[in-house]
């Protein structure tokens, strides 16, 4: 027997500003840590996409994947490079388990236009 039930487990972020502001706000929200170097231990995430929808979803999902795979807790971050849909992000961490309710960014209802991002996160 197959049964389908409605399930609401998403939040929508709406971020306005130039690309730099949008990326900083998005990364800060996902990581929930301040910007700036604060540890010797870090990893780099490189995102290089042609389209904004791929860029933003890959950015969020790469952050989540790296932290979960490494089993570490973020303590700060820096954006080393940011150009049109190309980003080099350094995440500083310490041993420990990262606690977040964000499972992934989705393509559903994603919009990026006129210096405004709307992105849905699965929680």
Image (cartoon, rainbow, N blue to C red):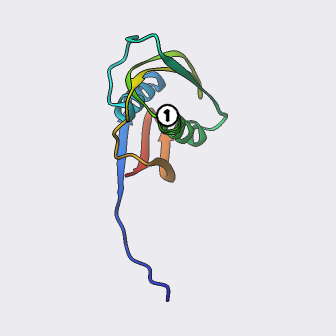
Q: Nearer the viewer, residue 72 or 14?
A: 72
Q: Nearer the viewer, residue 110 or 73?
A: 73
**Residue in the image at 57% along x and 39% along y:** 58
Residue 14: which quarter of the image? top left
Look at the picture and state if 5 lies above or below 11: below
Percent x, y of residue 55: 58, 36
Q: Which residue is mark 1?
A: 63
Give left or right: position of 109 versus 32: right
**Residue in the image at 51% along x and 32% along y:** 70
Residue at the farthest front position:
95
Look at the picture and state if 102 lies above or below 116: below
Residue 38: which quarter of the image? top left
Give left or right: position of 26 versus 42: left
Dot 1 alpha-carbon crowd within 10 angstroms: few under 14, some 14 to 19, many 20 or more: some
Look at the picture and state if 89 lies above or below 52: above
Percent x, y of residue 15: 37, 36
Give left or right: position of 31 versus 55: left
**Residue in the image at 56% along x and 42% along y:** 53
Marks counted in the figure total 1
**Residue in the image at 36% along x and 43% along y:** 13
Percent x, y of residue 101: 34, 46
Q: Nearer the viewer, residue 64 or 81?
A: 64
Secondary element at tag 1: helix
Q: Nearer the viewer, residue 81 or 34?
A: 34
Percent x, y of residue 98: 37, 35
Look at the picture and state if 112 lies above or below 9: above
């Amino acid at each position: 027997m197959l049964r389908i039930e409605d399930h609401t487990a998403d939040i929508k972020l709406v971020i306005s500003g130039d690309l730099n502001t949008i990326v900083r706000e998005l990364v800060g929200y996902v990581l929930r840590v301040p910007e700036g170097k604060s540890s010797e231990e870090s990893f780099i995430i490189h995102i290089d996409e042609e389209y904004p929808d791929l860029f933003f979803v890959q950015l969020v999902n790469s952050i989540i994947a790296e932290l979960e795979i490494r089993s570490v807790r973020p303590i700060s971050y820096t954006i080393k490079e940011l150009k049109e849909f190309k980003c080099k992000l350094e995440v500083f961490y310490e041993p420990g388990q990262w606690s977040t309710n964000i499972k992934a960014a989705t393509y559903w209802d994603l919009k990026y236009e006129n210096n405004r991002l709307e992105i849905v996160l699965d929680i």
